Amino acid sequence: NAGVMQNPRHLVRRRGQEARLRCSPMKGHSHVYWYRQLPEEGLKFMVYLQKENIIDESGMPKERFSAEFPKEGPSILRIQQVVRGDSAAYFCASSPPNEKGAQHFGDGTRLSIL
Amino acid sequence: AQTVTQSQPEMSVQEAETVTLSCTYDTSESDYYLFWYKQPPSRQMILVIRQEAYKQQNATENRFSVNFQKAAKSFSLKISDSQLGDAAMYFCAYRSAKGTGNQFYFGTGTSLTVIP
């Protein structure tokens, strides 16, 4: 039973480019969460999605960031016109419906902005 | 909003000894979950142990145990018989049990070094 799959593992972009991070939740999981981890810090919540719906985006920056979880395919976190401050590790987690306990985390995507 | 505080940025322990990592949290809720996650240099987030707030009994997983003090809002992690593989960042996390789809709130982490 595959865990949460994130790709790419590492992503390098130049300032002004777009970054697309992908997350495939565990089988049977319909809830997806994105977190950002800046160097030397804990994970900070960004957005919570269910299939085709954004439920809570209170942690998402208002500009340049967007997320989707389509009916088919992985969840995508998209960062437009990246800046140096976007360099971080981005983690995806998933949980099944009605799961009130632990979320299962992917291995993260390390985004580096040149 | 809930906050999670880890006041020890770094800790070290001699191999085979015991170490305790501290965590406090702030919430007005009565029903919630608490977790300890381990993040080795590979950056994976590995669940170490979890505690439901309504359970008075402290959770235990092999060499890992917690001291959960609900009134004091304290949730410390004890690692017994420390091994070299325990070296990692340890994050304490809180999650509400109200409804579903609740986000995690993480502390800033404690870096644990195990000395051979």
Image: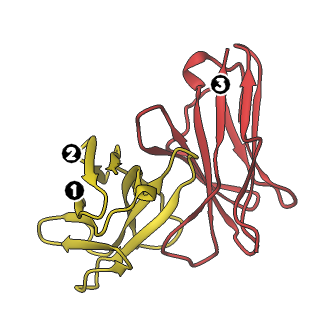
Chain colours: A red, B yellow
Q: Residue at x 48, y 33 (%)?
A: A38
Residue occupied by mark 1: B22
Q: Amino acid at mark 3?
A: Ser
Q: Amino acid at mark 1?
A: Ser
The extreme left residue here reads: B72
Distance from the alpha carbon under mark 1 to that under mark 2: 7 Å
Near mark 1 (Cα within 10 A), the count class, few <14, some 14-19 or many ≥20, is: some
Circle 2 marks a residue in which chain? B
Residue occupied by mark 3: A112
Residue B86 vs B79, above or below: the answer is above
Say whether residue B107 is left or right of residue A32: left
Say whether residue B112 is left or right of residue A22: left
The extreme right residue here reads: A72
Say whether residue A85 is left or right of residue A1: left
Q: Residue at x 74, y 21 (%)?
A: A13
- The answer to the question of whether label 1 and label 3 lie on touching residues, with beta carbons closer than 8 A, is no
Residue A23 vs A65, above or below: the answer is below
Task: Give the quarter of the image for residue B26.
Answer: bottom left
Q: Amino acid at mark 2?
A: Ser
Near mark 3 (Cα within 10 A), the count class, few <14, some 14-19 or many ≥20, is: many
**Residue A75 shows in this picture:** yes
- The answer to the question of whether label 1 and label 2 lie on touching residues, with beta carbons closer than 8 A, is yes
Residue occupied by mark 2: B7
Task: Give the quarter of the image for residue B48.
Answer: bottom left
Distance from the alpha carbon under mark 1 to that under mark 3: 32 Å
Circle 1 marks a residue in which chain? B
